[in-house]
Amino acid sequence: MEDGDYELLALYGFSARYPKSARLEFNPKSRREKGDLVLHLEGFKIFVSWGGLDEARKRYSTVAAHVSGSIERSLKGSGARLDGTPETRSLNIQGHDAIYTHATMLIERGGFPFGKRRVAQDTFSMHVHCEESGRYYVVYAFAWPQVSEELGKAFEAIMASLKCH
């Protein structure tokens, strides 16, 4: 995607550039303190979630602990397993520590009559805790390998432009 293929999304005091081709779905229960937004693109979705930092810190004292907890929940909830070691990168989002993770998970697909098989699915996530806004932000997505490169480009654009306060 070229730079002209993106536009700015700003709400509740945070913003990021996203692909113009995305259809946005705002969770109707979302509010300034906590919410979700889904960017629907051809072949994949990118999720943006936010919530109270105090609430997150009751479970996760650091961003790294938040990332580990998210991975554990993804594996436990889907019956998946990691394929190799996740790629992690430390980021700085407006002076805050943030962590980007890209992992390949093997998930079960199929069932009767052909039996189950494990297929690869890429997962991307970025976690940041922002003291100024009092919120945490998680951007995440899942993709089949055939659209993973396109998703990676869109995900990078969101991460590079995220303003959390």
Image (cartoon, rainbow, N blue to C red):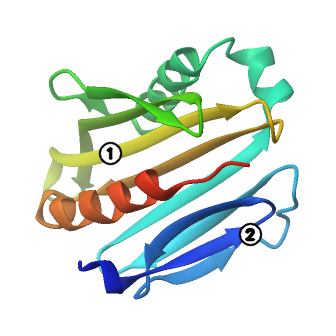
| Total labels drawn | 2
Is residue 131 toward the left or the right of residue 90 in the image?
A: right
Residue at screen point 42% across, 42% down: 125
What kind of residue is marked 2? Answer: Asn
Q: Nearer the viewer, residue 22 or 6?
A: 6
What kind of residue is marked 1? Answer: Thr
Q: Quadrant of residue 28?
A: bottom right
Residue 43 place in picture, x, y as percent: 29, 75
Q: Which mark is residue 2?
A: none
Residue 104 place in picture, x, y as percent: 22, 38
Q: Nearer the viewer, residue 144 or 64?
A: 64
Q: Dot 2: within a 10 Å radius of its alpha carbon, few (fewer than 14), some, or many (20 or more) residues? A: few
Q: Considering the image in quadrants, where does the N terminus appear?
A: bottom left
Residue 128 place in picture, x, y as percent: 59, 34
Q: Say above or below: 157 vs 117.
A: below
Q: Secondary structure at mark 2?
A: loop
Is residue 49 toward the left or the right of residue 132 in the image?
A: left
Residue 74 place in picture, x, y as percent: 46, 35
Q: Residue furthest top?
A: 61
Residue ID for mark 2: 27
Q: Say above or below: 8 vs 4.
A: above
Residue at screen point 50% across, 25% down: 67
Q: Which mark is residue 123?
A: 1
Q: Nearer the viewer, residue 117 or 75?
A: 75
Q: Quadrant of residue 100?
A: top left
Q: Nearer the viewer, residue 82 or 107?
A: 82
* C-alpha span from label 1 to label 2: 22 Å
Residue at screen point 64% across, 43% down: 137
Q: Say above or below: 76 vs 11.
A: above
Q: Quadrant of residue 38?
A: bottom right
